[in-house]
């Protein structure tokens, strides 16, 4: 492998599985993401408004393209229940070519297997 890709991984957290699944479904339906993976069971520890907080959360990993990442984050923000949601866009430096092509095709609206 070892090739530059156009795929980007967008990570966010949600307060519960239902919210994370709703965000993922909307992103896939709108072709802003090819896939959303919901990972329940996370615990986030952070400082908020001067106090240390600990919350159960659900991690959501969304696979998209560099070109669609900004649109995806804007759409997530519009639906997200948090005041300051976590949105991280991480470039994918390598991967299995058929999967990378599938992600690109899904986000472009092209027909893929």
Image (tube, grey):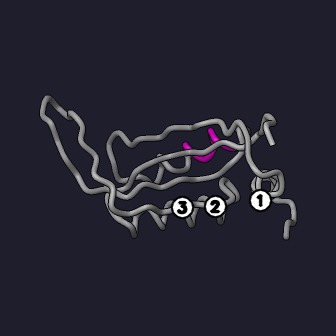
Q: Nearer the viewer, mark 1 or mark 3?
A: 3
For residue 52, above or below residue 35: above
Between 54 and 19, the residue placed more toward the observer is 54
What label does residue 106 carry, if any?
1
- The location of residue 81, given as percent across then percent down, is 35, 53
Of the pair 99 and 60, the residue shown nearer to us: 99
Q: Are marks 3 and 2 in contact (CB under 8 Å)?
A: yes
Q: Earlier in the sequence, mark 1 or mark 3?
A: 3
- Image quadrant occupied by the N terminus: top right
CA–CA distance in space, label 1 to label 2: 9 Å
The prevailing secondary structure element of the residues shown in magenta is: helix
Measure the C-alpha gap from mark 3 to mark 2. 7 Å
Residue located 48% across and 67% down the image: 21
Kindly give the residue lying farthest to the top in the view shown. 50
Q: Residues within 10 Å of mark 2 (few under 14, many from 20)?
A: many
Q: What residue is drawn where x is 38% and y is 63%?
A: 40
- Residue carrying label 3: 37
Labels 1 and 2 touching (C-beta < 8 A): yes
Instruction: Report x, y in % for residue 89.
Output: 57, 38
As drawn, is 80 to the left or to the right of 109? left
| Count of residue discs | 3
Q: According to the image, label 2 marks what residue?
A: 35
Corner quadrant of residue 58: bottom left
Residue 86 located left or right of residue 88: left
Q: Which residues are magenta?
A: 68-73
Query: In screen coordinates, is 17 left or right of 112?
Result: left
Q: Give the structural element (helix, strand or loop) at label 3.
A: strand
Mark 2 secondary-structure assignment: strand
């Amino acid at each position: 492998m070892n090739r530059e890709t156009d795929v980007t991984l967008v990570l966010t957290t949600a307060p519960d599985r239902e919210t994370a699944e709703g965000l993922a479904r909307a992103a896939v339906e709108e072709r802003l993401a090819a896939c959303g993976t919901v990972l329940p069971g996370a615990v986030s520890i952070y400082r908020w408004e001067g106090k240390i907080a600990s919350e159960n959360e659900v991690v959501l990993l969304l696979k998209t393209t560099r070109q669609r990442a900004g649109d995806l984050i804007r759409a997530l923000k519009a639906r997200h229940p948090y005041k300051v949601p976590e949105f991280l866009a991480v470039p994918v430096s390598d991967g299995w070519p058929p999967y990378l092509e599938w992600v690109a095709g899904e986000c472009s609206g092209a027909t893929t297997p």
